Image (cartoon, helix red, strand yellow):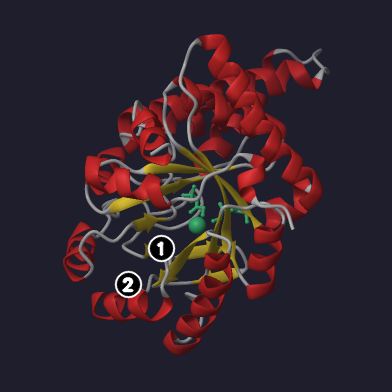
Amino acid sequence: MVSYKELGFVNTRKMFEVAMKEGFAVPAYNFNNMEQLQAIVSACLESQSPVILQVSKGAREYADQTLLQYMGKGAVEMMRRMAKEKGLGEIPIALHLDHGDSYELCVSCIESGFSSVMIDGSHLSYEENVALTKKVVEYAHKYDVTVEGELGVLAGVEDEVSAEHHVYTDPDQVEDFVKKTGVDSLAIAIGTSHGAYKFKPGQKPEIRLDILKEIERRIPGFPIVLHGSSSVPQDAVETINKYGGQLKDSIGIPEEQLRAAARSAVCKINIDSDGRLVMTAKIREIFATKPAEFDPRKYLGPARDALKKMYMEKNEKVLGSAGKAPLIMAELNK
Ligand code: G3H
Ligand code: 13P
Ligand code: ZN
């Protein structure tokens, strides 16, 4: 068993307390490889934002669970060294399992140094979701690991869970779910979805802030999580298509709606697809404009720079998390 504390991570409790009080959301950015991890950590350090490094089941398999543990430890140590070099304060970093689909996977992640896990029982019956989530919470809390549960089903693909239609979170269930399971945060379905195709052409890209408001009223002060929150930057989509890609009618969540959600009880916003798009756009551009280039550093490096810029902009303009790291560090050091 490796405790996340030995690796230098923190759980999400204080992050969410401060986010709730200050009206911002902590960014949860997914990573699968070194360049994504470098971009996320350096962007969040430079914008002095807290960050949740998010790993899906697929990412864990892709990167290898042992290597991942050391990458995580390396990310914290790199952040500390960079902070000293740049004269910046250290930032709080959580390592989080995204869309955990079983008790065993959550246990395995906790044993290998994750400070937070999501158990996604949203595709189960309400009773089964409560029972599974409660079981994970009982185990995780023994090690001071925080747990995210989910109620409602997002359209699109939730890892291996696919849902053709949204099943919006029912506000009537949230209080009971939170009470029975003991979860630390709750992911809800209010019209966001995973991937690059969130709305059909002609459809108004709108999330149900009214349902969010009602949920907030039922569980005041409780941290809410939004999945599927990429905005699908159209300049990246255009670049991809200009250089041979075939993305058609990709539409994301308007940034101002996410900003409004971040000001409310939404304390964690998940973004993965936007990073994939920005990275792909840059790599395609380099392959097309510099066809003689074959050193991976020459296309992965610029892709990493573009990613870093995107994360800094998200922290500043969408999450509102830029400059908030010192407030959380002060709470953690109390
Ligand atoms: O919610 C899904 C995340 O974007 C992770 O996706 O399962 O392809 O790693 P993935
Ligand atoms: P996007 O596909 O909108 O980036 O959502 C990511 C996500 O919810 C990860 O859990
Ligand atoms: Zn998700």
For mark 2, what is the residue? 169
Closer to us: 95 or 328: 328
Closer to us: 100 or 307: 100
Q: Cα distance, mark 1 to mark 2?
A: 17 Å
Specify which label sits upstream in the sequence, 1 or 2: 2
For mark 1, what is the residue? 184
Count of picture labels: 2
Q: Quadrant of the N terminus?
A: bottom right
Quick check: is the Cβ at mark 2 less than 8 Å away from ligand 3? no
For ligand 1, give the image quadrant: bottom right
Residue 11 position within the rendered picture, expressed as x and y whole percent measured from the top left = 50, 50
Residue 24 position within the rendered picture, expressed as x and y whole percent measured from the top left = 29, 41
Q: Image point 49% across, 78% down: which residue?
A: 134
What is the three-letter code of the residue carrying label 1?
Answer: Asp
Q: Image point 82% across, 17% down: which residue?
A: 295
Would you call the spot at circle 2 few (<14 residues within 10 Å), some (14-19), or many (20 or more)?
many
Q: Image point 59% across, 25% down: which residue?
A: 79
